[in-house]
Image (tube, rainbow, N blue to C red):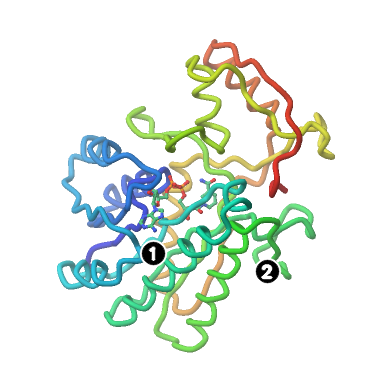
């Protein structure tokens, strides 16, 4: 087995998955342009695992750079996390999202095609189920639909990967549709720490609990849920990380395009989560209700 290239490996899910990969005995190479991650996270990753990990500070759309990585390392599989993920931002900046998420994927696939590596795990999202279906969502459900450009990039990427597998039976590709990754490695050295004001719930709660933000913004209390706030299936990031190791082992053995959901199967509301965070941390979490956020299902 060669090395595993982890694109976006300095980010939230990428760093935690690298821990799981290294613990399972795989060697890892990380590529990240650090547009939403800190280099410091790589130091923490090395501290936790005791391993030195080759790191390329590079954009996924840099074809020459990718070629150099494939020439330097024997890459036998790619875990593709690199992408932009803020739903609201994608509504405001669709071009940037399509360029980064679809353009990035296409450059990666074009360069991969010049190598003998045909195994890829793609970070998709449960957002592809849109609003037409009711939970629980089976992977086979159609049609997929998105309520924002971010979700569209995931649907288009999945379609592209499926078409590629259809055209060439050598590919082994798995798309993982994550529900809501949350939490941190037990060391406390890693976690979710995006640049700027977070649009994901857990880092936002952390900033309020630690007094860096004055209150927690609840987007919408008029949803058709028991307490009116959005209900989500939150999945611990280390469980998700282990899911990637399983998906990698599965993909190595199975040609073609496969899709799996990664979630727990049970939901929790925004208010329940905020109240639990307050109870466990012992820190006050003041709340303010805002209108529903554009693009949220
Ligand atoms: P993240 O922002 O923490 O990690 C993504 C990483 O990719 C960042 O480190 C960023 O710097 C890097 N990156 C972005 N564009 C790049 C580019 N063009 N070239 C190189 N590096 C680039 O996000 P995450 O939560 O770890 O998400 C990882 C993947 O999982 C994303 O594709 C995201 O869409 C998907 N996903 C995330 C969630 C979630 O709630 N966190 C849910 C479903 C799917």
Under circle 2, the secondary element is loop
Which residue corresponds to the image point at 39% horizontal and 75% vertical from the top-left? 109
The part of the image, by quadrant, that contains residue 125 is bottom right
Left or right: residue 180 versus residue 71 is right
Give above or below for 257 relative to 297.
below
Give above or below for 138 relative to 14.
below
Task: Report the number of numbered marks.
Answer: 2
**In the rendered image, which residue does mark 1 sit on?**
249
Mark 1 is surrounded, within 10 Å at the Cα level, by few (under 14), some (14 to 19) or many (20 or more) other residues, namely few
Q: CA distance from mark 1 to mark 2?
A: 22 Å
Tell me where residue 55 appears, x and y as whole percent.
Answer: 22, 52
Looking at the image, is mark 1 or mark 2 earlier in the sequence? Answer: 2
Left or right: residue 46 versus residue 184 is left
Mark 2, ligand 1, within 8 Å: the answer is no
Specify the label residue 150 is tagged with: none
Pointers 1 and 2 in contact (C-beta within 8 Å): no
Give above or below for 276 relative to 291.
above
**In the rendered image, which residue does mark 2 sit on?**
140
Under circle 1, the secondary element is helix
Which residue corresponds to the image point at 38% horizontal and 61% vertical from the top-left? 79
Mark 2 is surrounded, within 10 Å at the Cα level, by few (under 14), some (14 to 19) or many (20 or more) other residues, namely few
The part of the image, by quadrant, that contains residue 204 is top right
Tell me where residue 28 appears, x and y as whole percent.
Answer: 25, 56
Left or right: residue 92 versus residue 212 is right
Which residue corresponds to the image point at 49% horizontal and 89% vertical from the top-left? 167
Nearer to me, 181 or 244: 181
Position of the N terminus by quadrant: bottom left
Instruction: Please identify the residue farthest to the bottom as the structure is shown.
Output: 167
């Amino acid at each position: 087995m060669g090395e595993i290239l982890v694109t976006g490996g300095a980010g939230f899910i990428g760093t935690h998955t690298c821990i799981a990969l290294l613990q399972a005995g795989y060697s890892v190479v990380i590529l990240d342009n650090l547009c939403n991650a800190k280099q410091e996270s790589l130091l923490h990753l090395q501290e936790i695992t005791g391993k030195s990990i080759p790191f390329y500070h590079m954009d996924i759309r840099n074809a020459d750079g990718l070629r150099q990585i494939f020439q330097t390392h024997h890459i036998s599989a790619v875990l593709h996390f690199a992408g932009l993920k803020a739903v609201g931002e994608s509504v405001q900046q669709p071009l940037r999202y399509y360029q980064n998420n679809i353009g990035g994927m296409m450059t990666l696939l074009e360069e991969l095609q010049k190598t003998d590596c045909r195994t890829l795990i793609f970070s998709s999202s449960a957002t592809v189920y849109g609003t037409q279906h009711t939970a629980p969502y089976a992977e086979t459900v159609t049609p997929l639909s998105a309520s924002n450009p971010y979700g569209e990039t995931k649907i288009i990427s999945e379609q592209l990967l499926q078409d590629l597998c259809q055209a060439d039976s050598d590919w082994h590709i798995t798309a993982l549709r994550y529900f809501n990754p949350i939490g941190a490695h037990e060391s406390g050295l890693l976690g979710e720490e995006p640049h700027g004001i977070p649009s994901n719930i857990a880092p936002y709660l952390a900033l309020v609990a630690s007094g860096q933000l004055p209150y927690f913004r609840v987007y919408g209390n008029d949803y058709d849920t028991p307490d009116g706030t959005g209900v989500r299936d939150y999945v611990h990031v280390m469980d998700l990380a282990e899911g990637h190791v399983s998906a990698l082992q599965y993909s190595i053995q199975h040609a073609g395009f496969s899709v799996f959901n990664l979630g727990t199967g049970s939901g929790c509301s925004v208010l329940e989560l905020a109240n639990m965070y307050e109870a466990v941390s012992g820190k006050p979490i003041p709340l303010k209700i805002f209108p529903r956020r554009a693009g949220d299902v």
